[in-house]
Image (cartoon, rainbow, N blue to C red):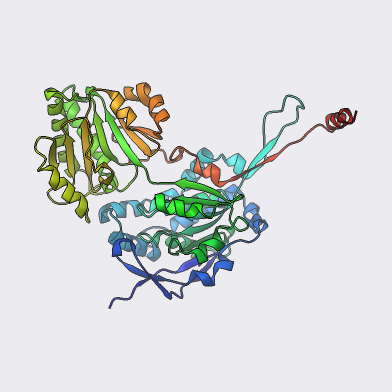
Amino acid sequence: MRSPLQIPFIIRGELIDNCTLEFGGRGGNIAFSTPNLKNYLDRLTLNAPSKMADLYALTFDDIVDFLAQVGKKLVLSENPHLQAAYDLSCQTSGISDSILRHLYEAIPEMFSPAVVRETAERLVGIDYLEKWVEQPSRVHTGKPSRIRAFGARCVHVIAGNVPMVGVGTVIRNAFTRSDAIIKTPSNDPLTATAIARTMLELDPDHPLTRHLSVVYWKGGDESIERHIYDPRLVEKVVAWGGFASIRHITQYLQPGLDLITLDPKHSATIIGPEAFADADTMRSVARRLALDIGVMNQEGCVNARVVYVACGTDEAGLEHANQLGKLTFDALQKLPTTLSTPHKSFSRELKDEIDGLRLAGDEYRVYGGRSNEGAILVSQNDTPVDFARQLACRVANIVPIDSMDTAVMSVSAYTQTIGLYPESLKDSLRDRLAYQGGQRLVSLGAAALFEDAAIPQDGIEPVRRMCKWIVEQTSDGNALEALAAGASH
């Protein structure tokens, strides 16, 4: 019998590798063992926030320099810990090996000084992280207020669908001067661990190393969670997860504990009639739509699934929708293997649903879906398939519509990214889509290509919320005495 993979803990600059507890990976893909976290709870949490003072002995330049050194050690071909994380992800992830390699090889760039500085400046503001920043004078006193962003003691319950979640968490924790406990996911328990282990080997006594812990416990273990989710020990919880896991965490909420949720979303696409101006335009739109569907094998919240196309539902409109469906399926098969491939673990339930559509007469056209190559399902009316929430593995549903109102009204607070074509749709629809709950509007083809990562996420600014925003106000002493004197008569 094969021994379970050992996943050590990194707790405040110390490697703990006496792995005695065994867990099953998500979907039964792997088994792994870890130390017993119950033996280390007192070392895991930081009982006094004053112990974060060592982080404030660092300048922002010190933080940037240390992260740059870490990044240089995170070259996939040279770092055995990162290589182990990649090898494990190849077994557990829905993302194909060639795409994963491309993602892991991009990790050092995320630690580069230019990227860290721009991210910190855009997401928080370096001045606020580095010093007390004077605000405009108040009218009635002429005295300025000052504001500074301080780090907090945080628990990060991260997602494992893409390795970049763990990477970004480590970097954000560092430049906000926070104290992090990262709970790794069962489908990627090694990526954040590999980065923390690299930091430990580089400098175990560095404040950024000593204020980072990476551990695993099975969600729902109250003997662990009641200790950790205590506002005397932790001030913020940043949670990526589904309805059940987020609702579970809420039972621990009380004054002093702030929950920041990055819950799963679904994304959408709206294509105007301009897509059918001529054959070349339609082919271009199909290629861009294939990108939105296929990048990262449709494993992200950002990927397109239901595609509303304003071509009409008459005979001519349906012909356009079906042509677009065929062209998109063909373009999907031609995407570079660093972006997308046939899915290595295609959902059996989804395959059954696709096969069922072939028996539905004239209600749907199905392009592909015979094996794991993905599929484009074209509705022959203005209604999505009834299993739209299950669309995955490079499967999308094109829905022809007569009015843009149909597409707009489909958007809700669960809609994250909306790909739009042509660009003019942004001007005409962006306010209405925002009212409905849409959170990110992009050009068709760019849904999963984060050309600008230093932006709000899921309709909030999570990094600003990770900080504690402290205010210092100065008042005129004479005015205060006059106020007191007036109040006494």
Q: Is residue 185 visible?
A: yes
Residue that lies at the very extreme toward the bottom in this rendered image: 1
Quadrant showing the N terminus: bottom left
- Residue at 40%, 65% in the rendered image: 81
Q: Is residue 315 above or below residue 329?
A: above
Q: Is residue 328 visible?
A: no
229, 273: nearer the viewer: 229
In percent of width and height, residue 4 lies at 34, 73
Q: Measured along the vertical axis of the image, is residue 407 above or below residue 198? A: above
Q: Residue at x 29, y 24 (%)?
A: 404
In the picture provided, is 480 more to the left or to the right than 74? right
Residue 60 coordinates in the image, percent (x, y) = 59, 48
Residue at the location (71% across, 28% down)? Answer: 137
Q: Is residue 382 above or below residue 104?
A: above
Residue 26 location (% of width, % of height) = 33, 61
Residue at 22% of width from left, 55% of height from top? 344
Nearer-the-camera pick, 396 or 412: 412
Q: Provide residue 489's location: percent of width, then percent of height.
A: 90, 28
Front position in the image: 383 or 133? 383
Left-right relation of 248 to 415: right
The part of the image, by quadrant, that contains residue 399 is top left
